Image (cartoon, helix red, strand yellow):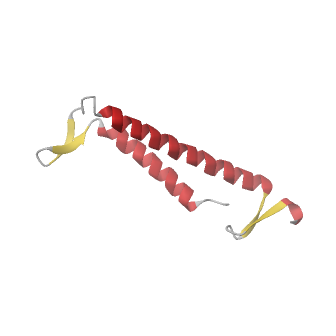
Amino acid sequence: MAGGGVDLPCAGSTLTLRHYARVVRWQRTLVLVVMTVMSVLSAYLVVATRFAYGRVLFNVGGTHGLHLSDIPVLGLWGVGMVAAGALWRRPTE
């Protein structure tokens, strides 16, 4: 391809090699974020059953509610979902 571009059929345009490398680096970084978040979340859920759940912040019925220890789990889940959404979108420009 003339001008140092690369044909990317899925992108529908021609990107320079430098831009393509930047996109790939961005996507790989997001993959690492998703992998890290999901690993930490899984480890936390396994270990958290041994610790106290903390005080109840919001009651849902008599025996269920949102505990203080649920906040990090929800935060990590949110970060993982944002990163997964960015990967789904696959920015190319």
Q: Position of residue 83 (x, y in %)?
A: 51, 50
Residue 32, quarter of the rendered image: top right
Residue sticking out furthest to the top: 51
| Quarter where residue 42 is shown | top left
Q: Position of residue 6 (x, y in %)?
A: 79, 62
Q: Residue at the left extreme? A: 62
Q: Tell me which residue sits at (50%, 54%) in the image.
A: 84
Q: In the rendered image of this protein, does residue 75 appear above or below residue 47?
A: below
> How many numbered circles are shown?
0
Q: Position of residue 17 (x, y in %)?
A: 79, 55
Q: Which residue reaches farthest front?
A: 46
Q: Image quadrant for the C terminus?
A: bottom right
The one nearer the camera, 65 or 49, is 49
Placement of the N terminus among the 4 image quadrants = bottom right
Answer left or right for 75 relative to 56: right
Out of 73 and 50, give the one closest to the viewer. 50
Position of 88 compared to 14: left or right?
left
Most extreme residue toward the right, as rendered? 2
What's the residue at 73%, 51% (across, down)? Answer: 21
Q: Position of residue 75 (x, y in %)?
A: 39, 43
Is residue 46 left or right of 36 when viewed as pictured? left
Residue visible at 68% across and 52% down in the picture? 24
- What residue lies at 67% left-to-right and 48% top-to-bottom? 25
Q: Say left or right for 86 vs 38.
A: right
